């Protein structure tokens, strides 16, 4: 078999490697050498690369070369993962565990392959950050961080995630076994770091700490006395939470106060909202995303004044913003001037932020496809996951998210029970996230309410 493989390499540009001949290649040094020589130019699955890399019969130098191909292939695999996949969370866990195994194996052989470490360093960092970005809200991310921490100095990896110590990461990795007070202590330390380094809520460390904080608030081991510690963390580090995170935390905080029969301290959040409202008045709903600042300033206070003329009888003037529902004649948004202005400003935003808009549109489309699939199969829809996903998308651009939901809620074609379930979840998630300003919220919610009232 190996002889046939060697002939294929000589006679063909792209020899076939599969489960039927992989063992023969491993056991024949000449065939293995031929494979390594042509490895960068042939198609080989991740599964087979894993088999080759983990094979102890192969010398460490050769495994190091195979590792370069494996890291490149793994990075490409993660990048291409469809975010609409129902089991993306489990795929994330599997990917993180595999990368940890890879890292542990690399640690044992690194001293034997010094000539390859510079090349491996480049591919390792690329793969590491690709996984961090794709699975930022995965609860197992700290496992990946602990694996990468071993190579922080060796590969000169710079990340805010490494500002937590290995013991701290171990605590939040094993949050199910650790006491609530222990985990909250690490969360507090994490927010001290976030605060001291002025890290944004979208920073990987901020997201990691926030995800574990949410998980701990929902923990079955939580007792009434723990709520005091939670209050202290929220109150002390309130400026480090995004608007969406604050809304979500307030909702969860009220839930646990109700569950444990404790009077909630609404002043914690009220003070923050008052400061936020004062800031928004001064900046007129300016978004944190600098690429959207010009757009938002141009449209300052646009939706406050409603045009008086009624919309005329024509069906529409544009494939994107034409009327999707036969609104009642007294519905205030059913007006020509309103849609003309909305159409104009949407296209101005699109011209300035096309890449952002397309990214947001793709992610919302994937999310809604997944929700519809679950509704169609009568599967349970975890509202908290939808909230987290919306928060992540809103961090890209809440303005783009407004336009997409304004359109989707107005153009819904399927007036079925499946759509009813989907839009109820989306409506609740939007309410909890709070990523829309007052006027945007009013527009989208009127669309959704009208839609829900007219679904059979």
Image (cartoon, rainbow, N blue to C red):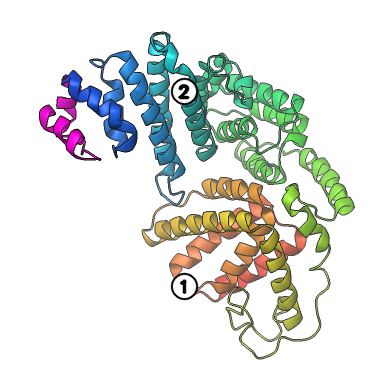
Mark 1 or 2 closer to N-term?
2
Left/right of residue 247 with respect to residue 142 in the rendered view? right
Q: Which mark is residue 31?
A: none
Q: Between tags 1 and 2, which lies in front?
A: 2
Left/right of residue 445 with respect to residue 39 in the rendered view? right
| Residue carrying label 1 | 414
Q: Position of residue 399 (x, y in %)?
A: 69, 57
Residue at 87 percent across and 53 percent down: it is 281
- SS at circle 2: helix
The boundaries of the magenta stretch are 1-27
Q: Position of residue 94 (x, y in %)?
A: 38, 33
Q: Which mark is residue 119?
A: 2
- Looking at the image, which is closer to me, 51 or 173? 51
Asked if the magenta segment contains residue 3, the reply would be yes
Q: Position of residue 29 (x, y in %)?
A: 19, 18
Residue at 41 percent across and 49 percent down: it is 85
Q: Specify the quadrant of the image occupied by residue 313.
A: bottom right
Asked if the magenta segment contains residue 401, the reply would be no
Residue at 71 percent across and 36 percent down: it is 200
Left/right of residue 284 with respect to residue 136 in the rendered view? right
């Amino acid at each position: 078999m190996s002889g046939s493989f060697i002939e294929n390499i000589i006679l063909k540009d792209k020899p076939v490697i599969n489960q039927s001949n992989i063992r023969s290649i491993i056991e024949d040094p000449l065939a293995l050498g031929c494979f390594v020589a042509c490895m960068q130019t042939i198609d080989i699955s991740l599964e087979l690369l894993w088999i080759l890399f983990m094979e102890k019969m192969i010398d460490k130098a050769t495994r190091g070369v195979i590792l370069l191909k494996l890291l490149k292939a793994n990075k490409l695999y993660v990048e291409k993962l469809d975010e609409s996949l129902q089991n993306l969370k489990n795929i994330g866990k599997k990917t993180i565990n595999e990368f940890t195994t890879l890292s542990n194996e690399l640690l044992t052989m690194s001293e034997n392959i010094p000539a390859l470490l510079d090349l491996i360093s480049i591919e390792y960092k690329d793969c590491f950050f690709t996984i961090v970005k794709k699975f930022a809200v995965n609860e197992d991310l700290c496992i990946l961080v602990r694996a990468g921490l071993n190579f922080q100095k060796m590969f000169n990896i710079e990340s805010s995630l490494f500002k937590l110590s290995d013991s701290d990461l171990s605590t939040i990795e094993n949050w199910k076994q650790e006491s609530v007070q222990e985990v909250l202590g690490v969360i507090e330390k994490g927010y001290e770091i976030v605060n001291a380094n002025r890290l944004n809520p979208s920073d990987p460390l901020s997201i990691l700490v926030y995800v574990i904080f949410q998980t701990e608030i929902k923990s079955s081991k939580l007792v009434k006395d723990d709520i005091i510690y939670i209050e202290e963390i929220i109150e002390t580090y309130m400026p480090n939470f995004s608007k969406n995170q604050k809304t979500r935390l307030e909702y969860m905080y009220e839930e646990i106060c109700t569950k444990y029969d404790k009077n909630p301290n609404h002043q914690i959040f009220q003070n923050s909202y008052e400061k936020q409202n004062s800031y928004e008045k001064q900046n007129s709903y300016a978004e944190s995303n600098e690429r959207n600042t010009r757009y938002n300033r141009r449209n300052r206070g646009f939706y406050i004044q409603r045009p008086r003329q009624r919309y005329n009888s024509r069906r529409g003037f544009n494939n994107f913003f034409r009327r999707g529902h036969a609104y009642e004649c007294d519905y205030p948004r059913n007006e020509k001037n309103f849609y003309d202005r909305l159409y104009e400003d949407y296209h101005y935003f699109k011209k300035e932020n096309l890449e952002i808009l397309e990214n947001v549109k793709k992610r919302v489309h994937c999310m809604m496809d997944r929700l519809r699939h679950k509704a169609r199969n009568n599967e349970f829809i975890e509202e908290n996951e939808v909230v987290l996903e919306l928060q992540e998308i809103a961090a890209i651009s809440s303005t783009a998210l407004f336009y997409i939901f304004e359109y989707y809620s107005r153009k819904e074609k399927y007036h079925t029970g499946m759509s009813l379930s989907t839009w109820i979840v989306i409506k609740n998630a939007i309410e909890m996230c709070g990523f829309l300003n007052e006027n945007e919220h009013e527009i989208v919610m009127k669309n959704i309410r009208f839609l829900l009232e007219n679904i059979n």
